[in-house]
Image: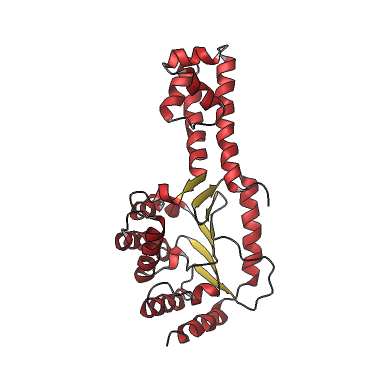
Amino acid sequence: MNASPSSSAQAAREAVAARLVDIRKTAGLKAHEVAARCGWHKSKVSRLENGHTPPSDDDIRKWCQACDAPRHAPDLIAASRDADQMYVEWKRIHRTGIRRRQEVDVPLYDRTSLFRVYCSNVVPGLLQTHGYAEALLSTISQFQGTPNDAADAATARLDRSRVIHEGRHRFVLLVEETTLRYRIGSPSVMAGQLGYLLEVLSIPSVAFGVIPFTAQRRIWPVETFMIFDDERVQVETLSAEINITSPGEIDVYVKAFARLQRMAVYGTKAQSLITAAIDTLR
């Protein structure tokens, strides 16, 4: 792989900082002059220019105004926001609970035509039942030490997942067979979740594939990720959500997904693996 997404996020922040330096130099100003015009201590200018402190929207507006370049502010604010969202720790995202995070993604889900999702550890959020989602999200809240609003968050997650049934989106969803066996919630919760996966197999817009234990690996099991059209990849690690918009990095995940997709089984073969998992609950 290329540089890690977290290092790409840092590179994006450094690019914003470099742009601030360029705007200042184009204006013919010294760092201390920008500080004086903005009413800041000169150390703040140093932190901003070295990428040690991410600029706020207001910082960027003041900087551009001080450099007689207000026209650059909107694009620079957008770039700064993108950099800020590339790598975000879960504890920050979930600081007020998980429900809000489900709601924030609704516009992204609505405008996406093709979803490509790979999950190596849990059932994809788009296919989770309320019981399964609540059990999973409660565990996440407890682990992170963030407010536990699992019931409301699960309801919001299911509302977000309505796109599955709208008929104007397409989905290719892949899971490792292990995800069918991991006990998330009680046996009855797991039975309900696996039963729902059997129903999903009949949805025309959904291709649901299972990568068997016995599959000859074309690629090793990797981190859970979602590809939204060819515009964005969301990667989930234990500590953070990573949003990738660089075309080169997106291509890496598209390549990985294609290899994972070729290892999966679908239709009646996937049904057999799901049914076998259900049988272990009895």
Q: Residue at x 54, y 16 (%)?
A: 31
Q: Could you say where residue 47 lies in the image, as x and y percent from the top left?
A: 52, 26
**Residue 70 appears anywhere in the view:** no
Provide residue 15's location: percent of width, then percent of height. 59, 32
Q: Quadrant of the C terminus?
A: bottom left
- Viewer-nearest residue: 183 or 270: 183
Image coords of residue 50 (percent x, y): 57, 28
Q: Is residue 23 left or right of 111 when viewed as pictured?
A: right
Q: At 44% across and 64% down in the image, what residue appears?
A: 126
Instruction: Check the image and report above or below for 168 versus 270.
Output: above
Whether residue 133 appears in this view of the structure is: yes
Scheme of image coloration: secondary structure
Image position, residue 216 (x, y; %):
69, 74
What residue appears at the point 59 percent right and 47 percent down from the top-left corner? 5
Residue 142, picture quadrant? bottom left
Q: Nearer the viewer, residue 253 or 202?
A: 253
